[in-house]
Image: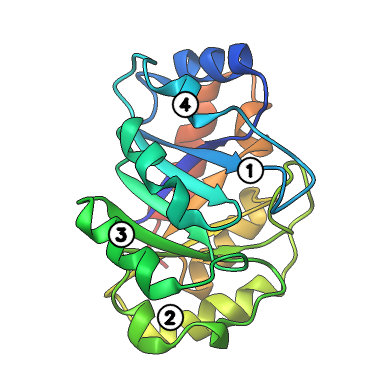
Amino acid sequence: MSEIIPTILTKDLIEFQEKIKRVEGIVSRIQIDVIDGIFATNKTVDLGLLRNLEHQLRLDIHLMVKEPIDWVAKSREVLADRIVAQVEMMSNVKLFLEEVVTSGIELGLALDLDTSVEKISPEIYQKLDLILLMAVKAGFGGQEFNSKVLEKIKKIKEMVGDLVEIGVDGGLNEKNIVECKKAGATIFYVGKTFWEAEDLRERYEELEKLVISNW
């Protein structure tokens, strides 16, 4: 089933808390973007500060970090429902997969804009709950969508069919969300196009209609 998931990318704890409050009762799941300052020259709120945050939301933790395996325990502490990690600074993909599966958390891998689909073997793709394809360079918000992600979505769809969710993240708006869905994506992570709306509920419902429509 197709889904719209708002993302939070910030180094400001107060902004993070405010956004959580704003979406409760509107969405059931959000994505927390985690950047360590090594994967990219950017850094977000420390996961450790979020352990006692009260909310009713399901959490996707998107790890844009060096050695994501070292962040699985931290993600578990904030009660992550799904961990999605960039592969670019991951030294052993299979060990990471085993660590997340052992934790009982849904598992995802993410490919940066310039990372080829062939970097990961088809047999690994089929073990995942989610494959996330970046439509921008991972690590920074507010970038413009790059349409070359569409071919990557199609390739992944050919490999996994309907067995694995295909997510897309970065610069999404009303037009390119539709293009990504047509290419085979099922989960759409939205940042700027969601948070800049005056009425978040209305905006979420507008975007949701785009992805649940049948063509």
Mark sitting earlier along the chain (2/4)? 4
- Residue 21 locus on image (x, y percent): 46, 13
Q: Nearer the viewer, residue 69 or 28?
A: 69
Q: Callout 1 environment at 10 Å: few (<14), some (14 to 19), or many (20+)?
A: many
In the depicted structure, whether residue 15 falls above or below residue 125: above
What amino acid is labelled 1 in the image?
Ile
What amino acid is labelled 4 in the image?
Gly
- Residue 183 locus on image (x, y percent): 52, 74
Which numbered dot is residue 157? 2
| Cα–Cα gap, marks 4 and 1 | 13 Å
Circle 1 residue: 35
Mark sitting earlier along the chain (3/2)? 3
Mark sitting earlier along the chain (3/1)? 1
In the depicted structure, whether residue 108 falls above or below residue 116: above
| Cα–Cα gap, marks 1 and 2 | 28 Å
In what quadrant of the picture does the C terminus appear? bottom left
- Labels 3 and 2 touching (C-beta < 8 A): no
Mark sitting earlier along the chain (4/1)? 1
Query: In screen coordinates, is 193 left or right of 110?
Result: right
Tell me the element at label 2. helix
In the depicted structure, whether residue 13 falls above or below residue 93: above
Mark sitting earlier along the chain (1/2)? 1
